[in-house]
Amino acid sequence: AMEGSRELTFKKESVVRGHHISKTFWAPALREELAVEREEGNEHDRYAVAVRKDGRVIGHVPRGSMSKISWFFLRRGGNITCKISGKRKRGHGLEVPCFYIYHCGSSKMVSKLKKLLA
């Protein structure tokens, strides 16, 4: 990449929820990078955002403003990756600490997310 074209990203410290469901087929590895996508047809949450590994849902972005903002960000063509940052722990069920990295097209979008996800 050329100098000065540093990718515009916003990093949010959070967790992957629902590891108690995926623990039989997914063992989180530190710094592992995973795909983040809107989950169509989730009857519990219309703004559900899934974290996937090799196409398989291994967990979700925490429900509420976080998943809603992420859902709209993805719907508008944004891209989010999830980077595992620690060992699983008990929270709402089993959770895995991570950073959600929002790949933004502009610095304006970065500051918007900073405000929304503060």
Image (tube, rainbow, N blue to C red):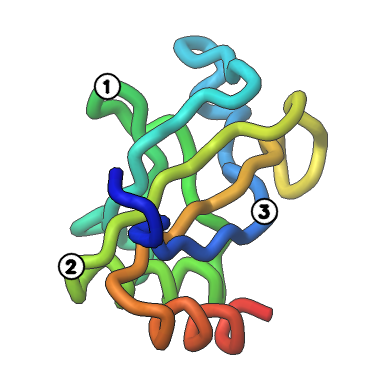
Q: Nearer the viewer, residue 98 or 65?
A: 98
Above or below: residue 14 compared with residue 87: below
Does residue 54 appear in the picture of this structure? yes
Query: Which callout, 3 or 2, points to the residue nearer the camera?
Result: 2
Please report whichever mark, 1 or 3, sits nearer to the chain's N-terminal start. 3
Residue appearing at x 59%, y 19% in the figure: 28
Q: Is residue 44 left or right of residue 11?
A: left
Does residue 49 appear in the picture of this structure? no
Give the x, y percent position of residue 15.
65, 47
Cα–Cα span, label 1 and label 3: 21 Å
Give the x, y percent position of residue 4.
39, 61
Q: Is residue 27 left or right of residue 76?
A: right
Residue appearing at x 59%, y 26% in the figure: 31
Instruction: Give the quarter of the figure containing the N terminus.
Output: top left
Instruction: Tell me which amino acid carries mark 2.
Output: Gly
Residue appearing at x 53%, y 28% in the figure: 21
Instruction: Tell me which amino acid carries mark 3.
Output: Ser
Please identify the residue farthest to the right as the structure is shown.
90
Q: Which residue is mark 3?
A: 14
Above or below: residue 106 compared with residue 100: below
* 1 and 3 marks in contact (CB < 8 Å): no
Please report whichever mark, 3 or 2, sits nearer to the chain's N-terminal start. 3
Q: Which mark is residue 77?
A: 2
Secondary element under disc 3, as helix, strand or loop, is: strand
Residue 52 falls in image quadrant: top left
- At label 1, counting other C-alpha atoms closer than 10 Å, the crowd grade (few under 14, some 14-19, many 20 or more) is few
Q: Which mark is residue 54?
A: 1
- At label 3, counting other C-alpha atoms closer than 10 Å, the crowd grade (few under 14, some 14-19, many 20 or more) is some
Secondary element under disc 1, as helix, strand or loop, is: loop
